[in-house]
Amino acid sequence: MKFIEFKQKIKTLPVFSTGLLSSLTDDVETLKVQLSMWKKKGLIVPIRRGLYLLNKEDRKIEPSLFYLANQMFIPSYVSLESALAYYGLIPEFVAQVTSVTSRKTCKFKNEVGVFSYQHLHPKCFTGFNNMKELNDLSVLIANPEKAVVDFLYLNLSKFNISDRKIFTESYRFQNCEKLNKKKIKAYGNLFGSKKLTSICDLFIEELIK
């Protein structure tokens, strides 16, 4: 198969996987060899094993980093610093896309960015929304309160109940007035950690009141 023919077949897909190849040709092995050649030429961009983008000039849909994060490791949703920055709850630019998953903790680095995933127990894998982007792609992202609780839990060793200024001075939380106290408490209770419950209460006292 020539690349121009392949490109025409998959140009409307934001990403494509090797699992798709059998629907494009009867000679999957030959197409796999061609994929390897096209990768070396920069015609396709690998984002993780078996998952690719068309090169920037040829792709018709430009998927966001959040969308790619969802697709690269399933199930996962964007949370932690990336979600906090998205909602304006922290001011910093986040260099990597941060997500949580019910699978193992892992990290991927490719041509488009760095993507990290931290493990949560399946019972805590909740509190996320299906957000439609401008290109009509769907992204799973933590709601603001769950992003806060995920962050507190996965950084729990850094927090001390006596350090009341750590939220604003070390992590520079901001714009927290509209967060829902009941949601923060409910999400915190999912984890079954007394320390997390105390830190959530302290967060509420200091930033929501």
Image (tube, helix red, strand yellow):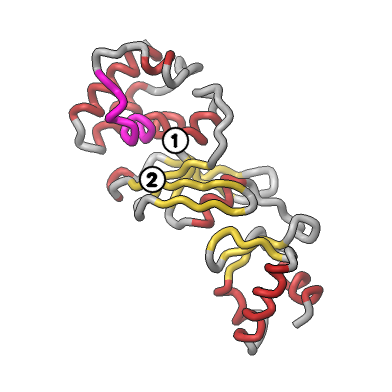
Position of residue 28 in the picture relative to residue 183 (left or right): right
Position of residue 173 in the picture relative to residue 35 (left or right): left
Q: Which residue: 60% across, 44% down?
A: 132
Labels 2 and 1: the sequence-earlier one: 1
Q: Which mark is residue 96?
A: none
Percent across and percent down for residue 109 are: 54, 51
Q: Quadrant of residue 61?
A: bottom right
Q: Which residue: 39% across, 39% down?
A: 127
Q: What amino acid type is highlighted by mark number 1?
A: Leu
Please tell me which residue lies in front, 179 or 61: 61
Percent across and percent down for residue 204 are: 34, 17
Q: What amino acid type is highlighted by mark number 2?
A: Gln
Q: CA distance from mark 2 to mark 1?
A: 9 Å
Q: Which residue: 45% across, 38% down?
A: 79
Q: Is residue 154 magenta?
A: yes
Q: Which residue: 24% across, 33% down?
A: 189
Position of residue 45 in the picture relative to residue 194 (left or right): right
Report the magenta residues as a range: 149-160
Instruction: Classify 155 as above or below 1.
Output: above
Instruction: Classify 16 as above or below 175.
Output: below
Q: Quadrant of residue 149?
A: top left
Residue on which the image places disc 1: 80
Percent across and percent down for residue 88 are: 55, 24
Q: Secondary structure at mark 2?
A: strand
Residue on which the image places disc 2: 118
Magenta portion: prevailing SS class = helix
Q: Secondary structure at mark 1?
A: helix
Indicate the quadrant containing the C terminus: top left, top right, bottom left or bottom right.
top left
Circles 2 and 1, Cβ within 8 Å, touching? The answer is yes
